[in-house]
Image (cartoon, coloured by chain):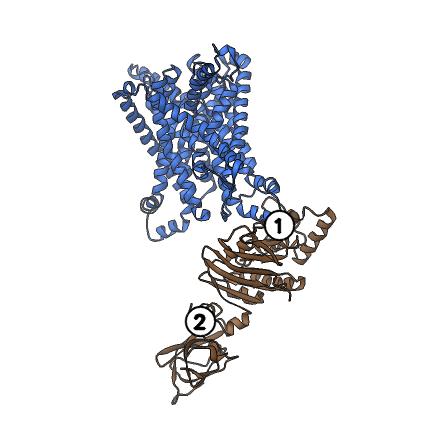
Chain colours: A brown, B blue
Amino acid sequence: MVPPLLEISQLSKFTLADVQLDVWRGEIVTLLGKSGSGKSTLLRCICGIERPDSGLIRLDGEEIEGPNRFLPPEHRGVGLVFQNFALFPHLTVEENIRFGLKQLPAGEQQRILRQQMALQQIEGLEKRYPHQISGGQQQRVAVARALAPSPRLLLLDEPFSNLDEQVRHDLRIELRELFKAQGITAIIVSHASNDAVTTSDRIAFLDGGQIQQLAPPVDAYDQPSTPFVASYLGRANLVTARQREGRWTTILGEVPIDDPSSEPAEGVLCIRPEWIGLERAPETGDATIQRIETIGPQHFATIRMESEDFLVNLAFDRSWQPGERVRVHLALPRPLRCLRKT
Amino acid sequence: MWPVIGSLFVLIPIGAILSYWLAPPSDDWSHIAENLLGLYIRNTVAVVGGVGLLSAILGTATAWLTAHYTFPGHRFLQRALILPLALPAYIVAFIYANLLDSAGPVQRGIRSLFGFESARDYWFPQILSLPGVIFILTIALYPYVYLVTMPIFRWHARSYTDAGRLLGGNWWTRITRIEMPLARPAIVGGALLCMMEALADYGSVKYFGVRTFTVGIYRTWFSFGDLPAAARLCSCMLLGVFLLILLERLSRRGRVSVAQQEGTGCPATRLHGVRAWLATLLCALPFSLGFLIPFLSLAWWATEDWRLVLTQDYWAMLSRSLFLALSVSMLCVLLAWLALFSGRLLRKRGVTALNQTMSLGYAVPGAVVSVGILVPLAAFDRGLAGWLDRQFGWDIGLLVTGSIGALVIAYLVRFLAVASQPIDAAYQRIPVELDDASFSLGRAPSRLLGSVHRPLLQRSLIAAAILVGIDIMKELPATLILRPFNFDTMATKAFELASEEQLSAASIYALTLGLIGLVPVFLLCRYLERSHGSAAT
């Protein structure tokens, strides 16, 4: 069996404690977490500009950081796109991209330069200085510079944080397509769930110095493993569920549980607002709409049921009014999973 | 109005000096131009150029080492390398002259160690020489380069060097292609500051007998009493100052400032074995030469007969110096503050230009400022005395020229820039919207100044007053030229006693100045650490 491209085991540094992470060849993984969660520290340990207090890092089966060996950053073959891009301000775009190619013959350098500029759609900017191009273009140059020496692994530290919303949206789609087309293995650090969901094959949720869950975005959305993951990926109703005679029930109704045998008798579930359906029932309704809020084109209702409030996604339906009595039903996309306490 | 007043303080002396080119030259000037001008130019260029070059090398090398590596004494030396700024260069000069001349302890030690009978039996570098002055000024001034380049190597250029490393660049590539190009504007800026200080120096060159422009100006005024000739010499020197300012501006052009980039502050690499001790030695040497040895020597000499010096006269002079320095510094801070406040309210380019003119004063050497002030003041005094004599038959002599007033004006011209820099920096951090909010709540500009700006600027105003006060206490050439008869400050007394070879007495005054000079150095240290503290951890 082919081993993972990157293997991290029991890595500790500052807030990070015993972090485990495997990244497979050609995979895009996002380290998602709030500021101070240690995600940038982890990234800097992988590329070698910071050293962990303990732990082991292997790249392509080779130990690059561990009790017996420290491979300096310049010999790791790991590319990094910095948060502030760190484009050399005194060098032109062309000189920036060529910086890591000095050991190659001039013709080869030129070929790679052309190729990267075409891939990043920045042709014509060769002679410009970083301060003469836009933020989006700077980001493209930074990616081109990092990719030019063909690194074994590409790391991106908050690559979209300095960009405005439209540029950000376009770039994350483009980057994903480019990485997939070129077979590039990448780890992206981000605090924005939208960036992570759009670009990644898997997301590693970092909180309290540990990876809470490592899963594809859809799995993490449907079956978050902790309250932190549940709330980070979107709005969530955290509902208490009890097991009785092999069936799990909540105040909202009966729910199927993934692998119920391993779960305890009581647990907390994440039920997304769009999984709850409403039906008007002025006489027999067991819940009341408290308020309606509009976010963009969508509407959300807060309903109260037995003194507990739940959020319901009404999609584009504007007909609901506060005070209406309703009956609730669940439409779950797949079985749920009890949340771990963090 | 205030920016106009502030800039007039600088423009009037400069204009007065330049106006002498319109009058026919005096006989003394012909003599100076024929026999001395070439010598003054050669010596000044050598001193200024040598100090600039050596300070750039020393300041950059120590900054690079302390920013990238840790070695024995690293934390201490990182701060200690700034300490030479505490001692005025003329004091360091007189210390080394006494330490290294043939009767000094070093040569006495060599003679007794090797059994030489006299100084003629062996070779020893002549300290009282042009290279000697360059050495003294370099070890006294290199911290200006160190101070501006160290943060670049340690914090601002860090993410660029990390990027260079990840792109496979070795240490030599990183230095030559990333760090040096990024730090070059700062190195040049720091070196030019050293060169301006070297150009303005009077005490060291006079003590070492190297005839530069400042010595020439002083001599022309005191020996020949020839103000027009002194003014012409001053204008030659002004040309040098403007050349240095121009170079400084040019060095900034086309360069992207890296100072605004927030660095990541990676931990420095630990050096081991011989390399570590070599680094310690390299950083300890400039600190020892520029501060430790002079300070210990002063302390040693001062203990010899401190009882004779620490009399009522000493305390009277200390309090007089402190009072003068504090009162003028407060005046200076007030004027600079009002000028900057007006500039902020008006938000017009012209006002900013006036305020920039005001800060040129610091670049103009004290000797030039003094002559520039003497010219209009003497004209004013003569006019007033003549008018009073004609009208009332009163003979009042020169009213302002020989008074403390002239000295106060000179200090204002020189140090308005020192006061305005920290205040301006603090103003940059106060959003302009705060002013608008205050006006929208019906407050007059005076209330804005008093109840909004004053509390926010308080620390900077105090820091500015301290910096200016200490600069005034240390200022030598302007005080020597403009002080009233029989009026001494700590600086002039130290310099005079040193010139009269009264080593012990001079040391006590010099030591006092050195201890006072430590205050701004500590302020600088704290500022450096606070402004980068978050990045450093």
Tell me residue B37's x, y (percent): 53, 16
Q: Secondary structure at mark 1?
A: helix
Q: Is residue B495 left or right of residue A23?
A: left
Binning the other alpha carbons within 10 Å of mark 2 as few (below 14), some (14 to 19) or many (20 upward) gives: some
Can residue A126 be seen here?
Answer: yes
Binning the other alpha carbons within 10 Å of mark 1 as few (below 14), some (14 to 19) or many (20 upward) gives: some
Tell me residue B196's x, y (percent): 49, 28
Whether A214 is drawn above or below B8: the answer is: below
Q: Are marks 2 and 1 on the same chain?
A: yes
Please give the name of the residue rendered at 68% of the width and 57% of the height, measured from the top-left corner: A118
* Residue ID for mark 2: A340
Q: Is residue B190 left or right of residue A281?
A: right
Q: Chain of mark 1?
A: A
Kindly identify the amino acid type of the residue bearing the numbered disc 1: His
Q: How many numbered discs?
A: 2
* Residue ID for mark 1: A75
Label 2 vs label 1: CA separation? 40 Å
Tell me residue A24's x, y (percent): 61, 64
Among numbered discs 2 and 1, the one appearing first in the sequence? 1
Whether B308 is drawn above or below A49: the answer is: above
